[in-house]
Image: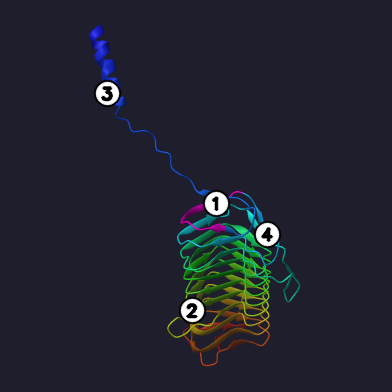
Amino acid sequence: MKHGFLNLCSAVVMFTSFVPAASHAVGPTRLRAPRAYPLIISEPGTYELVENLTVPSSDTDAILVTASDVTIDLRGFVITGPVVCSGSPTTCSPPGLGFGIYTSGAAANTTIRNGTVRGMGRDGVHIASGNIEGVRAVSNGENGIVAERCVIRDSMASSNGLAGIVANSCVVTSNVASGNGDSGIRADAGPTIGNIAISNGNEGITSQGTPSGSAVFRDNMAFLNRGNGISADFGVVLRNAAYANEEFGIHGGPGVGFGFNAFIGNVLGETSAMGAHELAANLCSDDLTCP
């Protein structure tokens, strides 16, 4: 009996000696306010903000990214500068050169998510390429969000001195741009889907694309803007609504095809087609055969 017990204990020891030790995953690098701005990220990886950041002047950058493949989770915190934008049309003061989050040099594939950038001298977020998700860019001296080769989604850009969102070769979807000094959304060469542009100082949603880089505007709403609701040089404009804009519902050049849109109550008229091609019927106030 004694020998059997010892043999059992030996078996247990042998079995447990082969159980692998638990692994301890390394989490995101935590970001805190630096002693001197900007806070510089020079290594690829995942980072998370753990407190609000406040820059001392409108000429100061908050976060400078110099490495590729960086993800920054703002975790609901706020990056704040001293600029205040107000009025209609929107004006901002004091002027400055500082960015909230900026990528420099060859830095690419940057992801910014889940937080607010407010009161910077220039752009709230300005990246070369990557993803912007769930970001609020408010009251920045120039543009709210600027990006190329990107996805911008579920974000809000409001009361910025120039445009709310400026995108080139991007997917722009499910965003709100309101009360900006210039256009709400300027999206060149890419799909712009399911966005709302309201009460901006120029066009609600606009594209200055080329024949080789046309825009696709679909399922957007543009209303109460000081310029055209939707404006495009090249591309396809489908299933949008433009209401009560101070110029035309749609302003389109000969490289534009449009259909299934609703243009209602725009001050200068519902359409300024300029040779655009009607792909399907549109609603212009009570007219089902416009333009």
- Give the prevailing secondary structure in the magenta stretch: strand
Of the numbered discs 3 and 2, the one sitting upstream in the chain is 3
Magenta span covers which residues?
40-50
| Crowding near the residue tagged with mark 3, few <14, some 14–19, many ≥20 C-alpha atoms within 10 Å | few
- How far across and down, in percent of the image, does residue 269 sit? 64, 87
Q: Which residue is mark 1?
A: 48
Q: Is residue 123 magenta?
A: no
- Please name the amino acid that badge 4 sits on: Val
Screen quadrant of the N terminus = top left
Screen quadrant of the C terminus = bottom right
Q: From the image, state whether disc 1 or disc 2 is nearer to you.
A: 1
Q: CA distance from mark 1 to mark 3?
A: 43 Å
- Please name the amino acid that badge 2 sits on: Ala
View extreme (front): residue: 36
Q: CA distance from mark 4 to mark 1?
A: 18 Å
Q: From the image, state whether disc 4 or disc 3 is nearer to you.
A: 4
Of the numbered discs 1 and 2, the one sitting upstream in the chain is 1
Q: Quadrant of residue 283?
A: bottom right
| Crowding near the residue tagged with mark 2, few <14, some 14–19, many ≥20 C-alpha atoms within 10 Å | many
- Please name the amino acid that badge 3 sits on: Met
Q: Which residue is mark 2?
A: 215
Of the numbered discs 2 and 4, the one sitting upstream in the chain is 4
Q: Which residue is mark 4?
A: 55
- How far across and down, in percent of the image, does residue 279 sit? 46, 85
Of the numbered discs 4 and 3, the one sitting upstream in the chain is 3
Which residue is at the front of the view, 174 or 210? Answer: 210
Of the numbered discs 4 and 1, the one sitting upstream in the chain is 1
Q: Which residue is mark 3?
A: 14
- How far across and down, in percent of the image, does residue 272 sit? 59, 89
